[in-house]
Image (tube, rainbow, N blue to C red):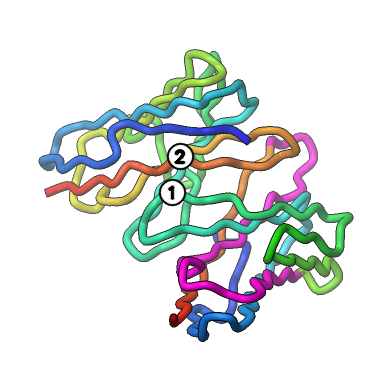
Amino acid sequence: SAVISQKPSRDICQRGTSLTIQCQVDSQVTMMFWYRQQPGQSLTLIATANQGSEATYESGFVIDKFPISRPNLTFSTLTVSNMSPEDSSIYLCSGEGAQETQYFGPGTRLLVL
Amino acid sequence: SQQGEEDPQALSIQEGENATMNCSYKTSINNLQWYRQNSGRGLVHLILIRSNEREKHSGRLRVTLDTSKKSSSLLITASRAADTASYFCATDEKETGANSKLTFGKGITLSVRP
């Protein structure tokens, strides 16, 4: 199984600022994804992080708001830009390992004031 | 849009009892995965069942898949207080030429009373 770490684990940010979340996988994975989980809700896919090319965004999510990088097969970042209180959520990255299993990081809990 | 829909939404049982959670979905799938989440933490992968499989076991977990009914069930036997968590099913939809991605249900809150 893949072990995934995220930094920071939590943050409190001011409205209008940006936060970059890092995701590190301990082994090479073909696919990496970013999800958002709003309070008391399920997970919603933000985008697929593609290595060496632009991320593929889901409906309702745009690159200007959630720029994503994936410079290599084991690392990705998600930036939450120009934050508002509505962006308060848990942000999780995942990697697809062997046998199509997706493994998740511990999440980054974001509170925007 | 959410593909998987679990039921019940909340389940409370006594330690030692079995817990059964169900998940229904709408489209053809490549596989279905069950996850556990403890109190707003990350997701722990429990089990993956492929569309050509009908039943899988892992320790105290038993998962079934009925593709004709587009449904799956997760059975936890001899439950423990530590099983208290939210459980999610997630489907990997079968789209020709597309990369895999998971669609999550709303989740089931399981409480196991000691």
**Based on the displayed image, in which of its 4 quarters is residue A7 positioned?**
top left
Q: In this view, does A58 lie to the left or right of A87?
A: right
Residue A81 picture location, percent across and down: 25, 33
Residue drawn at the location 63% of the way across and 43% of the way down:
B101
10 Å neighbourhood of mark 1: few (<14), some, or many (≥20)? many
Q: In this view, does A1 lie to the left or right of B112?
A: right
Residue drawn at the location 24% of the way across and 53% of the way down:
A86
Amino acid type, mark 1: Gly
The correct choice, above or below, for B65 with respect to A37 in the image is below
**Based on the displayed image, in which of its 4 quarters is residue A9 positioned?**
top left
The correct choice, above or below, for B54 with respect to B46 in the image is below
The residue singled out by tag 2 in the image is: A105
Callout 2: SS: loop
Residue toward you, B80 or B76: B80
Residue toward you, B38 or A71: B38
Q: Is residue B79 magenta?
A: yes
Amino acid type, mark 2: Gly
The chain identifier of the residue carrying mark 2 reads A
The correct choice, above or below, for B113 with respect to A32 in the image is below
Residue A106 picture location, percent across and down: 41, 43
Q: Label 1 near label 2: C-beta < 8 Å?
A: yes
The chain identifier of the residue carrying mark 1 reads B
**Based on the displayed image, in which of its 4 quarters is residue B17 positioned?**
bottom right
Q: Which contiguous range is marked in magenta?
A: B71-99
The residue singled out by tag 1 in the image is: B42
Residue drawn at the location 48% of the way across and 84% of the way down:
B12
Q: Is residue A103 magenta?
A: no
